[in-house]
Amino acid sequence: MKKTRIGIIGAGPSGLAQLRAFEAAKKEGHDVPEIVCIEKQSNWGGMWNYSWRTGVGKYGEPIHGSMYKYLWSNGPKECLEFSDYSFDEHFKKPISSYPPRPVLFDYIQGRIKKNNVRDYIRFDTTARWVSFDEESQKFTVVLDDLKIDKTYEEEFDYLIVASGHFSTPNMPYFKGIENFPGQVMHAHDFRGADPYKDQNLLIIGSSYSAEDIGVQCHKHGAKTVTLSYRSNPIGVNWPDGIKEVPLLTHFENDIAHFKDGTSEKYDAVIMCTGYQHKFPFLPDEMRLKTKNNLYPDNLYKGVFFNDLPRLIYLGMQDQYYTFNMFDTQAWVARDYMMGRYKLPSKKERRYDIDKWLKENDTLQSGNDHVDFQSAYIKDLLAISDYPDFNVDKVGVMFKEWLKDKDENILTYRDKTYQSVVTGTMAETHHTEWMDELDDSKERYLYQNESEEELSDTLEVTSI
């Protein structure tokens, strides 16, 4: 008999979580399916794989990543820690609770390198189209090998969509914006705060990206930062130089006019107006259609497409939990594909989805959101053998994090937390975040070490 074939679209944190789940089963002695992971970038990591490029990449494909220089984790690392691969195991020493992007990318890579999954991944390859045959119960995926410009087909028994949902921008129009003389861009194309030094910057939006880009530009020398919100302000205690105003209504050259009747002159505009769940490779009947929320409709357990459960979506939720949530989803998906977890009937699945949707509609505060997603994680843990972690303690940390940000948006990254995986208390970073302008791994990890210690540590962490 032919082996079951599984296709994974995307080798970011969700796709890598799925590969890790199968490797865990393999190490336990289980016979795992044949796996092919498709990744359109030249390396794994998804959003964490930074590229200086904007617009289109080397082979003319739209750039996937929205990552930028100087990005530091905006939540405690203890809230996203893999329960089967701790920060202690990777770095061999305690580190601070808010690492920069290169350090988190190194951590993601450390676990996946340990599990030898690179051979499953076809890099510089993109999915063009998917079809499903009801009779054979198989997917046909049309693929492009971008390096050699070759189009071919692959057949799979199960298909996992792990392509993320922070790549296709929502780009609104405001009257007069076409005559704005300065730079106008979406956060997707933001690559760092350096160009905005000594500038008056307008940011449209009240999302986490608006908050983070605004604070980063303030930190790196923007003259002023104004955040314009549509319905509700972020509402933290902003420092001098950052303010929030109601929604932009229109531009007159470089003058922006707002809903409260005020106006101001700006040098540049960044749209932090969110992203679309976009799956151009899927036909309409298989496409997840949702806005960014904690529980997308039509996904049983937030994972299985209810009309066609062989189609699996990972990481499509609005996220408090990230890496460890992707893991719990991947473990459940793996068990289903290996016949170790049976799905209930479509009617029962619909009932369960509706129950979560109804609860989701009642949420009002950030703490409510944390409790809801914590309950979701525990629901997944109850039906899988993913290494358990103390979800309730992580939930408490998330609530403390929300409070820390409200108290001081510029210093919350200087706080430290305790790992629920190892019990290790995070180290205080050698430099306060507002004074730390170098986000390199070397500066972050080894600033206070001697040359001999540095050589030894670099040798260990490069393995």
Image (cartoon, rainbow, N blue to C red):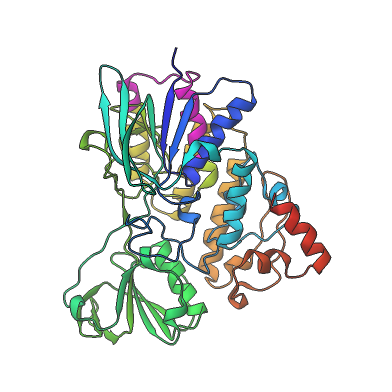
**Residue 28: in sight, yes or no?**
yes
Between 126 and 84, the one nearer to me in the picture: 126
Specify the principal SS of the magenta part.
helix
In the image, what residue occupies the spot 52% across and 70% down? 409
Q: Is residue 88 left or right of residue 450?
A: left
Horizontal and vertical percent position of residue 144: 33, 43
Between 374 and 322, the one nearer to me in the picture: 322
Which stretch is magenta? 326-350
Q: Quadrant of the N terminus?
A: top left
Horizontal and vertical percent position of residue 25: 59, 26
Q: Is residue 77 left or right of residue 225?
A: right
In the image, what residue occupies the spot 37% across and 41% down? 295
Q: Is residue 216 magenta?
A: no
Q: Quadrant of residue 391?
A: top right
Relative to 136, does residue 60 appear above or below in the rendering?
A: below
**Residue 206: in sight, yes or no?**
no
Between 454 and 413, the one nearer to me in the picture: 454
Relative to 197, does residue 431 appear above or below in the rendering?
A: above
